[in-house]
Amino acid sequence: VFLCSMADASEDNPSEQELSRLLIAVGTYEGVLAGWKFADDELKIVFASPTHQGSVRALTFAKSHQLVSAGYDETVRIHDFEKRQTSVGQVQTTETPVGVSACGPHHVLVALTGSLVLYKRRDWSMLHVLRGHEGGTTALAVHPSAKLALSAGNDGKLKLWDLVKGRLAYASKVDKTHAIDCIVWNSDGSAFAFCYGSHLTVRDVASGSDLLDVELPSKVHQVCFLKDESQGLFVAAGCDDASLPILLVPKDDQSEERHAIMAIEPVDGPVAGEERYKCIQAVHGYQVATATSA
C-alpha cells in the first residue's frame, strides 16, 4: 500500500472547512487507485478505479488535482481525478518502477530497479538517465526546489543527484545491514530523514552532521516531518509494532538532550497486518495520515 496526502490549508489547527480540502490517495496491491476526502467528521471515498496490471509500486501528487502512479506492469501514469480521467498520459518503462516523484510542474523522476530516469511530462521524453544503485533502488525523494534528489539502495548508499546537470553530486555509505526503506526532506529542504531497520537518522544538509540518530524499539517503515513555528521540527515514525513515536529534532548536532513521546503505544505480542503502520504522511501542523496493509 502506498499513500500520499495533500492539504492546502495554512493553519496549524484547521477547521472542518479547511479539512474538506484534504485528499488522501492510495494505491493497492491489486492495482487500484483510490481517493478519500474528509467530510462530516469522516473520510469519504471520491474515486476508485483499476489503473495498473499488478500492484501500485509508488504514488505522488503532481498537481493539486493530478496523481502520478508507477506500477508493477512497468508503466507510469498521470491521473486527473478532478476531470475523472484515469489516464492523461503514460509511459512504458524498461524495468519495474520502485519510486516516482514529481519535479516541479514539468518533470517526473522515476526510480527503476537499476537506474533513475528524469522524464519531460509533455511528451515523456527522457531528459536524464542516471545510474542507480547496485542491487536496486529502495527509496527516492526530490528536494523541494526540484533541482536535487536523494536516492537509496540495497548497496547501503545514499546518493544526491543534480537534476539540472543530470549527474551525481555526492554519495555516502551508510553503515548498515538493512536496506534503506524511506527518505524524506523537510519542507524547506534544509534537512532530510532516512530509516533502515529500526534505525532513524535526521541529517542537516548544510553541515552534513546528524541532528538525530536513534534506534527505535521496532522496524520503521516510513517517516515524516512535522513542523510548528513555536515548538520546532519533529519527526514521526510509522513502526512495525503499531507504535507511532514522535521525536524533536535538535537545532544542531551538539544537543545531547532528547525529547520524544509515544503518540500511540506499541501492541503487546505478535502484531497483525492490520495493525502495523506501512505508510505515514504529514498533512499539516501535528496531523498525519497513516495506512496499514488492511
Image (tube, rainbow, N blue to C red):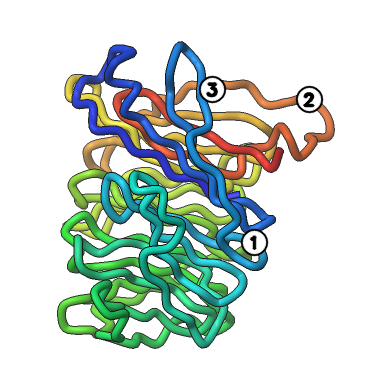
Compute the Cα span from label 2 to label 1: 31 Å
> Where is 16 relative to 272, above or below?
above
Seen at 47% across and 43% down, the residue is: 25
Compute the Cα span from label 3 to label 2: 14 Å
Does residue 156 appear in this view?
A: no
Seen at 30% across and 33% down, the residue is: 7
Disc assigned to residue 55:
1
> Where is 178 relative to 85, above or below?
below
Name the kind of residue labelled 2 in the image. Asp
Nearer to us: label 1 or label 3: 1
Which residue corresponds to mark 2? 268
Q: Position of residue 32 (x, y in %)?
A: 60, 53
> Where is 123 relative to 83, above or below?
below
The quarter of the displayed image where residue 129 is located: bottom left
Taking depth in this image into account, of 91 and 108 the one nearest to the observer is: 91
Q: Image quadrant for the C terminus?
A: top right
Name the kind of residue labelled 3 in the image. Met
Does residue 272 appear in this view?
A: yes
Nearer to us: label 2 or label 1: 1
Seen at 27% across and 72% down, the residue is: 121
Q: Position of residue 154 (x, y in %)?
A: 57, 73
Disc assigned to residue 260:
none
Which residue corresponds to mark 3? 262
Whether label 3 touches label 2, CB < 8 Å: no
Give the structural element (helix, strand or loop) at label 3. strand
Name the kind of residue labelled 1 in the image. Ser
Question: Which of the two labelled residues, at mark 2 and mark 1, occupies the earlier sequence position?
Answer: 1
Q: Position of residue 257 (x, y in %)?
A: 36, 29
Taking depth in this image into account, of 169 and 87 the one nearest to the observer is: 87
